Image (tube, rainbow, N blue to C red):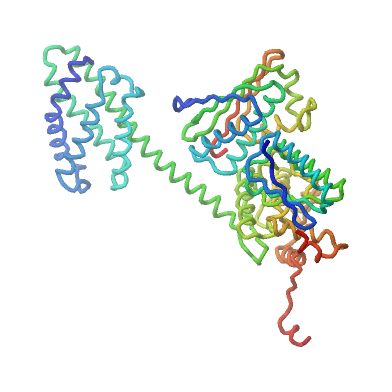
Amino acid sequence: MTRNIVTALQENQDRILDQWVNQRELSEDFGGNFNSFDDLKAQSSELLTAVLENMTAENITDLYASDLEPLIEYVSGLTLSRAKQGFSPRETATYIFSLKDALLKVLGELITEDPKELYRSTLEISKFIDNIGIVSFETFIRGREEVILGQADEMAELSTPVIKVWEGIIAMPIIGTLDSARTQVVMENLLQGIVETESSIAILDISGVPAVDSLVAQHLIKTVNAIRLLGADCVISGIRPEIAQTVVHLGIDLSKMVTKATLASALRYAYGILQLEVRKAGKEKSNL
Amino acid sequence: MERIPILKMGKFLLVTIQVDLYDRLALTLEEDLIQMVHKTGARGVLIDISALSIVDSFMGKIIGNIAAMSSILDAETVVVGMQPAVAITLIELGLPLSGVHTALNVERGMALLAARMPEETDSEDVDDD
Amino acid sequence: MWTTTNQNKEQLSILHDRDVIICRNRIKEVAVKIGMGIVNQTKLITAVSELARNMLIYAGGGNVIVEVVARGREQGVKIVFEDKGPGIQDIAKAMQDGFTTGKSMGMGLPGAKRLVSEFNIESTVGKGTTIKIVKWKNG
């Protein structure tokens, strides 16, 4: 496309806008989503300005040109704000694509002498607007991805709660498979919990872990060692008989860790270390 | 030359490392500390690393050296206040610092050292300093 | 496989042991800027500390080039350590835990590798060594 045509389009911005919004007004999906015709016109004017201000004879065929960044940013912003207003991605894309009709119509009125030039320019504008539509779609998907990633983080966080069971004792039940990414979260939360509560004993309950293989055992050993570096002790509890069996069959050495069958026995062990005693109230009375 | 101050607290020595140590400073600390253990006849060394954002293999080696050397001079070493991220990194690096005792903070470290020396009475260290 | 996001390459020279700390602090700033969590930050700067010190001990110093890179949506920090030292004769051996030519604990290379997401080492005897590492924000 020649510079002259770009300039001519810029000079005819008002005409394109009129063309565009009037055609939008008539189309059926302009339902309740815009509050008024003025809103539609204001938004369309902004988008059109962004397109015409940034489009040049050079970058019209190269969407990755750095001078198109402001336009891409604007389209992303527009997509996000429309998504929040409840527009579907289809509606936003249709809205952007409808600009093409207006641009092409005015283009046809501007180039009357040279059909070859008209054909070439039409193709370029079509492709350019298509690309803007794609940018809008990508932004939409990215927004969704961010929500999904956020939820994944939240799930990891939720599945490893640190519980303060007594002054100086914290516990963390692990439910589900213990892979290396999960171990990192477990370690981080458990160690942070120890520092925050100034606990000297951490109980890691693995009743909810389906299987312990050598990799899981390695993760457990790492966690126990890291806890020791902080100056606290770790007890692994909730070891089911099947797990004890596989651990021995696989030749995994857990002898350097304190292991207990149940959370209750781990708690009893922890009380012992802290020199605490749990007694029945009545018994104590009768002793007095 | 810069030096890390070493405080004498009763029969223990306390070093609080406030800045990230470059290698030469760490070596100086190792030397000063061992001299001090010898001179004061200290029974325990507390190294507070709560302000350190990393412990790499060199720093790990210095801590290990201090513990081993002190042990020959009949003093026990406790590393206190290690940050969780530092502990996780050290384990991943392959340095579990097996030879040293650890404690959550200086207070717990003191208690740990005191508990490991039952043959001596606690009363002397209170007004010693 | 790495794409540069910006023209934000930075180069630092390691000539003294104090430079190792300056380098660590600068890389920590970069890691914080891209929103890396505290544990990954610590792992990254510990690896940097090991590799920068190695350069200092075995090659008398070298350059560190820092850059923010992106892989799809995820950002990371890429660091290149370049020295013109004697080079490493047997890389496989140098990557083994506990192997050392005597000046360190032998944790440097294998330890650093475990702390980062990607690790690449090239060395020519007599010419020098180049190590490239990448730590992804969530890696």
**Nearer to me, B41 or B19:** B41
Q: Residue at x 33, y 28 (%)?
A: A69
Figure quadrant of the N terminus of chain A? top left
Figure quadrant of the C terminus of chain A? bottom right
In the rendered view, tell whether residue C66 sits above or below residue A203: above
Name the image quarter holding residue B129. bottom right
In the rendered view, tell whether residue B15 sits above or below residue A93: below
Image location (x, y in percent) of residue C7: 45, 24
Q: Is residue C42 visible?
A: yes
Q: Residue at x 30, y 32 (%)?
A: A133
Q: Is residue A193 left or right of residue A111?
A: right
Image location (x, y in percent) of residue A229: 71, 49
Q: Residue at x 63, y 31 (%)?
A: C18
Q: Is residue A220 visible?
A: no
**Nearer to me, C50 or C93:** C50
Q: Is residue A75 left or right of residue A268?
A: left
Name the image quarter holding residue C93. top right
Image location (x, y in percent) of residue B81: 67, 51
Image location (x, y in percent) of residue B122: 81, 65
Name the image quarter holding residue A271. bottom right
